[in-house]
Amino acid sequence: MKKIFSKLNLLRFSLAVASIAIILLVLPHADHQGFTYEQNQPWKYPLLTAEFDIPILRDSTSMRVMRDSIDRTFVPFVKRDLQVEKESIERFNSMLGSQTTPDQKRLLTNLLVQTYQEGVLDNAVADFLRNNHSSTLRLVSTENNTREIMAIDASPMLSPRAAFVFIDSAYDARKSATMPPLTQEVVRAINLNINPNIVVDSLTDSKYRDQEYLTVNGALGVIKTGQRIVDRGEIVTPQIFTNLNTYMEMLATRKSDRHDHTYFIIGQGIYIAIILSVLYIYLALYRPAFFSDIRKMTFLITFITLFTIFSIFMFENVVQGLYVVPFAAVPVIVLVFFDSRTAIFSLITTVFLAALVATYPLQFLFMELITGLVATFSIWQLDRRSQLLRTALLSLVSYAFTYFTMLLIMGGNLSQFSWRVLVMFLINAVILSFAYVLILVIEKIFGFTSAVTLVELSDINSPLLRRLAEEAPGTFQHSIQVSTIASEAARAIGANTTLVRTGALYHDIGKLSSPIFFTENQHGINPHAGLDPVTSAKKIVSHVTEGANLANKHKLPPLVKSFIMEHHGKGMAKYFYTTAVNNNPDKVIDKADFSYPGPNPQSVETSILMMADAVEAASRSLSDYSPESIDKLVENIINGQIADGMFRESPISFQDVEIIKKIFKQRLATIYHTRVRYPEMKKDTATALNLENKQ
């Protein structure tokens, strides 16, 4: 029970539960009985018949056209606002005050009263009459306790602006010779007191307008129970689309009492749980190292979950938005930090989760899986940004081929071809080509190391390697040689070549603290001559911890730092230990004073480096570089490391070790091959040549 409910298992379980909950939260939960369809696309399911009577409603386009027509021709209902008339006239008289003569005031007031008697129209009503070239309005009369609709002539009625022009013109025409022209204050008073008294009767207008809308909203007929709604291959016209929507809405209403919506969500949750369980089983059985690394598990589940959420968002907010989502980026990015098989499983998981919202799941799965696999196969190891451009181009070609294939399968022709879809595929490929940016972000957040970063670090002009070349040239040359033979061995057994090459270049940077104490940097002077074996050993052993400190200072990735810590494992500085034992035959020598801090190699790559480092260093002491001596050297050193238990914690196999030995022997034979000795010219021949040249 303790093993089952271990902290690691609880964290894995929590990741899966959180992923399921978040995806369920953002998923659209309308139960469409598994039907997904689009207007003007063929119906891909079997014959669908009505389970109950369905009203045939007008499609949205026809409904909109008819409503617009009603709005254009509908004669508004208006009412006369007597209160506005009374208040405006009283306020007008008050504002005139002593600014006008009695005769002028009387004339202006009469003109305003006359205007109100004819009627001042609301601007909206005036615009309707003008736009429709009409002069008729409707009024509801309630005289004698009876309600009667009356048509009224609106031709003498004026808008507020026209009313002002009328008063101004009439005043000029009727004023006496003694009346002055209108002052600015009087004009302002007229403007402020011309308010509409013929306004829309909102309640009545809305009531009768809605009655006319009933002709639009009303059913054109009924699809009886058992009658056909749509058949396989039939194009979903606007009318059929409306009928399907009506059917789905009525179906959802009828099923609400049976809690089918809850069951639908439960079904979605089980579906997601099954997909994630398959991924978990794969990792547990075939990638236990990843499965036990909670950081990698957190990244993988988080990445898949966020990508699925992004897919759902694009589906709900962009027409055919799933085509824009670069699903091929999933295996590409996972491949950078994991391996190709895990990348493919991650692609399958993500695509199957996103298929929950795909309009055509079969088409979606076919296109995305094929394109994702093409992207995966196009990148064995991403170590150059230019590789992403090639992958993006291949993905675009794959999308186009699979799209044409599905058009032929579903329709039997290319009549449904859409340039818009191809443009979306192009946008998809462009987004994929920028996956490098996302890789950098993931590296920073999760502390991973990509092949691109390793390639950048392996540049010998980087500050730390440049310093190593200048301050410890012997160590630098040793690192170059180790990097060469180790990367060849890694390539031969299928290990991470880039990682081995970079780790080998940095494995001895700790020697920068005291370069002279290491043989490859000495030139006649040996500082160990005056030191006791323990002190000398500590100087030699310290290059591991000094290297780790430099790695931290220069922010080298943990993967590179592991090469520094593990390239000697928990081995010993045997030369100085043997010297100490020989110098003190009666004393027990503490091995801890001569041991490296370790740990022993934990990966295939660091194991390769340990072998290459020891073999290359020992090869410099050979006096004879014959194939036999090189063969003996390689066998003795690597077999000795195996006997010391250096590789017990590493996943490297005996078969890999044999291949590595073979590569080392070949490379050392090439490096130290015997050169052709140039013959010396005989004295008599040389004399003859000199005489010939003089002649």
Image (cartoon, grey):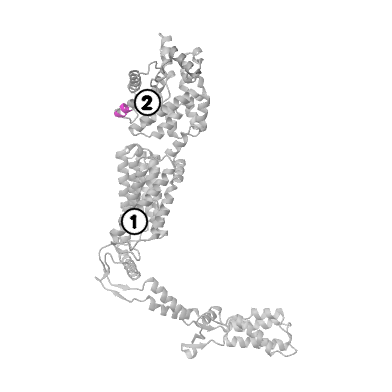
Q: Nearer the viewer, residue 14 or 692?
A: 692
Relative to 12, 132 lies left or right: right
Query: Label 1 crowding class (10 Å Cα cut-off): few <14, some 14-19, many 20+?
Result: many
Disc 1 secondary structure class: helix
Q: Position of residue 186 (x, y in %)?
A: 70, 81
| Label drawn at residue 287 | none
Q: Position of residue 443 (x, y in %)?
A: 45, 41
Q: Earlier in the sequence, mark 2 or mark 1?
A: 1
**Quadrant of the drawing holding the N terminus:** top left
Name the quadrant containing residue 682: top left
Query: Label 2 crowding class (10 Å Cα cut-off): few <14, some 14-19, many 20+?
Result: some
Q: Which residue is mark 1?
A: 403
Q: Amino acid at mark 2?
A: Arg
Q: Which residue is mark 2?
A: 667
* Above or below 278: residue 606: above
The structure residue drawn at horizontal position 36% and vertical position 73%, both measured from the top left corner, is 58
> Which residue ends up furthest to the front in the rendered image?
695
* Above or below 400: residue 461: above
Name the quadrant containing residue 7: top left
Q: Nearer the viewer, residue 549 or 12?
A: 549
* Above or below 28: residue 588: above
Q: Report the magenta residues as a range.
A: 655-659
Q: What is the distance, in whole Å, between disc 2 and disc 1 at their CAs?
A: 50 Å
The structure residue drawn at horizontal position 41% and vertical position 10%, both measured from the top left corner, is 582
Residue 646 visible in the picture: no
Instruction: Give the label, 2 or 1, closer to the camera.
Output: 2
Name the quadrant containing residue 56: bottom left
Residue 318 visible in the picture: yes
Tag count in the figure? 2
Q: Position of residue 363 (x, y in %)?
A: 31, 56
* Above or below 690: residue 44: below
> Which residue ends up furthest to the right in the rendered image?
178
